[in-house]
Image (cartoon, rainbow, N blue to C red):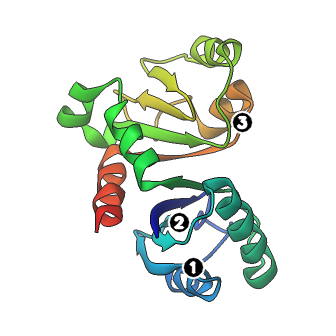
């Protein structure tokens, strides 16, 4: 059995993609996931599964959520090992310690190419700093995420892939849950 972290994109926003974490846990248990735990109300789930790839799990959960819960959203799944790599590859360790709520890990469906990363960096109008490593974009928002013009829409448009962000506090909490 492998531990996985699943992130649902854009759920429980005002008037959009409502799902209770109880429904999410029950859905995953019905399709055979074990030790299912959720964190917060923003679509964070940790579970164990038999040998399947993260991509297979993404497709499975997206399909079942659409059919059984009428929830159409992207699901991003990483193994515990991949999640640990997100943490160790963080290019902003000082920001992670000093101000973890202003450091975002944006987990991406696909790794963007260099031209797309340059396009995103060129789209920055504030003091934000972006570094992309594989299928994760790390973004420091020194003036706060809510005030920034570097929104999810701007990030996804420039990187040409979908993703969902979690602040560093949540990244570490999910790692702790996955570790057991």
On the image, numbered disc 3 is attached to which residue?
Answer: 161
Is 117 situated above or below 7? above
Whichever of callouts 1 and 3 sits on the residue coming sooner in the sequence is 1
Circles 1 and 3, Cβ within 8 Å, touching? The answer is: no
Q: Alpha carbon of mark 2 to alpha carbon of mark 1: how far?
A: 8 Å
Circles 2 and 1, Cβ within 8 Å, touching? The answer is: yes
Whichever of callouts 2 and 3 sits on the residue coming sooner in the sequence is 2
SS class of the residue under badge 3? loop
Image x and y of residue 140, in percent? 39, 28
SS class of the residue under badge 2? loop
Q: Is residue 65 left or right of residue 80?
A: right
Which residue ends up furthest to the right in the rendered image?
67
SS class of the residue under badge 1? helix
Is 166 situated above or below 159? below
Q: Residue at coordinates 51% horizontally, 86% vertically from top-left?
A: 22
On the image, numbered disc 1 is attached to which residue?
Answer: 24
Image quadrant where one finds the C terminus: bottom left
Is 83 situated above or below 38? above
Whichever of callouts 2 and 1 sits on the residue coming sooner in the sequence is 1
On the image, numbered disc 2 is attached to which residue?
Answer: 43
Q: Residue at coordinates 48% horizontally, 54% vertically from top-left?
A: 79
Image x and y of residue 139, in percent? 44, 29
- Inspect this view and state whether residue 56 appears: yes
Q: Quadrant of residue 19?
A: bottom right
Q: Residue at coordinates 57% horizontally, 35% vertically from top-left?
A: 135
Query: Dot 1: few (<14), some (14–19), or many (≥20) neighbours within 10 Å?
Result: many
Nearest to the observer: residue 162 or residue 16: 162
């Amino acid at each position: 059995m492998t531990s996985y972290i699943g992130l649902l994109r854009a759920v429980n926003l005002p008037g959009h993609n409502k799902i209770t974490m109880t429904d999410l846990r029950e859905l995953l248990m019905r399709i055979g996931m074990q030790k299912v735990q959720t964190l917060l109300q923003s679509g964070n789930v940790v579970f164990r599964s038999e040998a399947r790839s993260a991509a297979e799990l993404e497709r499975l959960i997206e399909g079942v959520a659409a059919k059984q819960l009428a929830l159409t959203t992207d699901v991003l799944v990483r193994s515990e090992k991949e999640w640990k790599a997100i943490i160790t590859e963080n290019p902003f360790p000082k920001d992670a310690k000093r101000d973890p709520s202003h450091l975002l890990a944006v987990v991406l469906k696909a790794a963007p190419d260099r031209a797309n990363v340059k396009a995103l960096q060129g789209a920055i109008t504030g003091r934000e700093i972006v570094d992309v490593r594989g299928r994760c974009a790390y973004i420091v928002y020194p003036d706060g995420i809510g005030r920034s013009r570097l929104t999810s829409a701007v990030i996804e448009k420039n990187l040409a892939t979908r993703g969902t962000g979690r602040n560093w506090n949540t990244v570490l909490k999910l790692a702790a849950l996955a570790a057991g």
